Image (cartoon, rainbow, N blue to C red):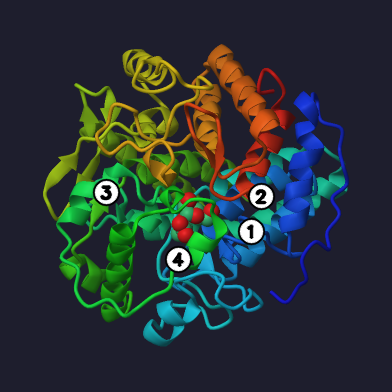
Amino acid sequence: MKERQGQRSYPEREAPENPSGVHPLAAGVLRRNSLESWTKPAPNLYPHQWSWDSAFIALGLAHLDNQRAVRELETLFAGQWSTGKVPHVIFNPDAPPKSYFPDAERWNSSALSEHAPRSARTSGLCQPPVHAIAVARIWETARGKDERHAERARAFLRGNYPRLFAWHRYLATARDPEGSGLVTIYHPWESGTDNSPRWDAALEGVEVGEVPPYPRHDLQHVRDPSERPSIREYDRYLWLLELLKRARYDEATVYEAHPFLVKDVLFSAILVAANEALLEIAEVVEAPDEERALIVRWIERARGGLEGCWDEGLGLCVDYDVRGARPARVRTVAGLAPLIAGGLAPERLRTQLGVLDSHHFAGCPGLKWPLPPSTSPDEVGFHPRSYWRGPTWPVANWLIWWSLLRAGEEDRAARLRRTSLDQLAEGGFAEYFEPFTGEPLGSDDQSWTAAVALDMLAAGENGA
Ligand code: 2M8
């Protein structure tokens, strides 16, 4: 990963339509954050390679430069653990000192675990598995071109499929020893929605011990500390990290004693969608029938597991705190997990769409844009400026938009897409937005924000 910033120039392709020049601006964000074979999630706040960011980035890059999208994922998968786990961060040895914490030394994963890769320094956690969805997009964009492009993409799929399969198998086994169909996370960072009130009750049950001192480099990169998780939250994050280190990142040991074990419905739903994408890839690479049958079983089992987390009163799915043995009844966008997992009965789909449009989410009076806040404004844990506690996240809008298309809800998807693109045309490629004022928050020039805009633009009005 020894590259200088800003070396890439992506060929500018004419976008099908281009509200207020979003397309060249989005391509510019990815170009500036690019380090040749991978992309920083943000110019300063996140100087390393993050797992699900890279998957979203590859989705966007697939429309600009298919081979660069391939390299993004190849660089990420080079850090895969021998268990199949794709780590949530791959550390950039050339990142400026004191730019991000916890750093590679704090994780110390290659010294602690025989399963960690030797060639790259990584964190010991993982993040939602958007990767197969990105690989499928690389294939879809390449096969529409000439045979040379299609063959190169096919070769990538052949090489990548076993890694994707190992990743999904790890999630279906090590992260679900109960066979429930639901993925267990060990840390809020694994959810990607770090300080969401989804985790408040489970974190309350964590008794924080002696945490070695740590800096908050992240606070240098935002205008106001309230945009990032609080000190209290960080103490818990760093304590959980210490406990995972004591367990040497060993799955069975973690499962036995770790105080934070939660069945994450959003993670599990993304895995269902990713397994559907994996089936498409399996078809292209002519994977063995037994593997395809296993993927189908994972999908069915997970849909069943999500059904078990359905909360009739909320019209949402809710996470399950394994340690506390109770559901986390919180209204957040993660509750749209059934919509994201797909395959819904008409009645269930109607309920989810009704909740999405309701005053709890996109229909909340006073919103700047009719887009769902990450946490419902009527939740006690809601905060309009604090990270995953309320702001609107473009990447979450993409997930919902894409899920609506898959559910055959084209008109609704078209409206959501138009509104999301208008938000970005006005507010830029912020990490997230204050839902009532529309103020851009967090980092500017966030890569996945630019990437999902490119994917939405490429899809055209009807998601074609
Ligand atoms: C945020 O998470 C990191 C920790 O992993 C952080 O707060 O420092 C989350 O938004 C996560 O979903 C995202 O992948 C990461 C990089 O954009 O930032």
The Cα atoms of the two marked residues, 4 and 1, are separated by 15 Å
Residue 314: x, y in percent?
A: 24, 24
Front residue of this view, candidates 406 and 450 = 450
Kind of residue at disc 1:
Leu
Mark 4 lies on residue: 84
Which label belongs to residue 58? 2
The earlier-in-sequence mark between 2 and 3 is: 2
Q: Secondary structure at mark 2?
A: helix
The earlier-in-sequence mark between 2 and 1 is: 2
The Cα atoms of the two marked residues, 2 and 3, are separated by 29 Å
Horizontally, residue 58 falls left or right of residue 331, namely: right
The Cα atoms of the two marked residues, 1 and 3, are separated by 29 Å
Kind of residue at disc 4:
Gly
Which label belongs to residue 73? 1
Mark 1 in CB contact with mark 3 (< 8 angstroms):
no
Kind of residue at disc 3:
Trp
Identify the image quadrant of residue 196.
Answer: top left
Q: Secondary structure at mark 1?
A: helix
Q: Secondary structure at mark 3?
A: helix
Mark 2 in CB contact with mark 1 (< 8 angstroms):
yes
The earlier-in-sequence mark between 4 and 1 is: 1
Residue 287 visible from this viewpoint: no
The earlier-in-sequence mark between 1 and 3 is: 1
Residue 7: x, y in percent?
A: 83, 63
Kind of residue at disc 2:
Ala
The earlier-in-sequence mark between 3 and 4 is: 4
Image height of 358 relative to 232, above or below: above
The earlier-in-sequence mark between 4 and 2 is: 2
Mark 3 lies on residue: 199
